[in-house]
Image: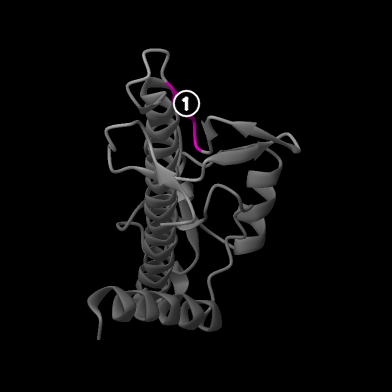
Amino acid sequence: GGGGGTAGKGGSGLSFPRRTSVGGRERPGSRPGGYTRSRAGSGWTRDKAMQGAKDREERRKIETEARERELLAKDSSVALAKEIAISLRRVTAFNWNDKTPAAKRGWYYKDDNGEAQGPYKSSWMRSWHQEGHFDREIEVCFGEPSLWFKVYHLWAESTTPSFMITRASTRVDAGKAAAFLKHRLGA
């Protein structure tokens, strides 16, 4: 087929065009795709080693890209799960503070001796954090001091802790968590 002939006198059954245009001119005895006439005249052969290396490299590239997409999906899924965990901790902290007697509501932190200090207003905690008096590793509690979190458990690494947890912000956090769980559970 294809307007060609059969290679070799004995007819190997391979069909190919008799002449191929290479570099703008016709060359007798050549075939596209790396086929060349062997010196022994036994028919047409292909430089399999070179093509095999190209094929393997292409497969490796495709497999690597697929693994990278899979890892990226896992990374974004892990990042989303971490964000949801942070949201749920803030909801928990808010509810804990909400159930605390009014005189004991607010922020507490553990000092260097492990003693609870507080309660303090959100603005004070934010200011002390910004001034470098404590870092993201310090344990804090919102409400009567018994439910402790490290600051980085309540605010992602990329954000500055505001120490502001309100009913409105916890509704948003709870909504994110509910949507995430609904999606994950397929409900």
Give the camera-side residue of 22 and 142.
Answer: 22
Q: Is residue 117 visible?
A: no
> Most extreme residue toward the front, as rendered?
9
> Most extreme residue toward the top, as rendered?
40
Give the camera-side residue of 124 and 158.
Answer: 158
| Residue pictured at 45% horizontal, 56% vertical | 76
Q: Position of residue 30 (x, y in %)?
A: 54, 31
Q: Is residue 101 left or right of residue 2?
A: left
Magenta span: predominant SS is: strand
Q: Position of residue 166 (x, y in %)?
A: 54, 77
Which residue is the site of mark 1? 36
Q: Position of residue 123 (x, y in %)?
A: 67, 61
Q: Position of residue 167 (x, y in %)?
A: 50, 82
Q: Quadrant of the C terminus?
A: bottom left
| Residue pictured at 44% horizontal, 54% vertical | 79
- Taking 68 as reference, is 53 above or below it? above
Magenta span contains residue 19: no
Q: Is residue 57 visible?
A: yes
Q: Is residue 163 left or right of residue 142?
A: right
> Most extreme residue toward the right, as rendered?
24
Graded by Cα atoms within 10 Å as few (under 14), some (14 to 19) or many (20 or more), the crowding at tag 1 reads some
Q: Quadrant of the N terminus?
A: bottom left
- Taking 28 as reference, is 144 above or below it? below
What residue range appears in magenta? 33-37
| Residue pictured at 39% horizontal, 67% vertical | 93
Amino acid identity at mark 1: Thr
Q: Is residue 172 left or right of residue 127?
A: left
Specify how the rendered protein is coloured.
one colour
Give the camera-side residue of 151 and 88.
Answer: 88
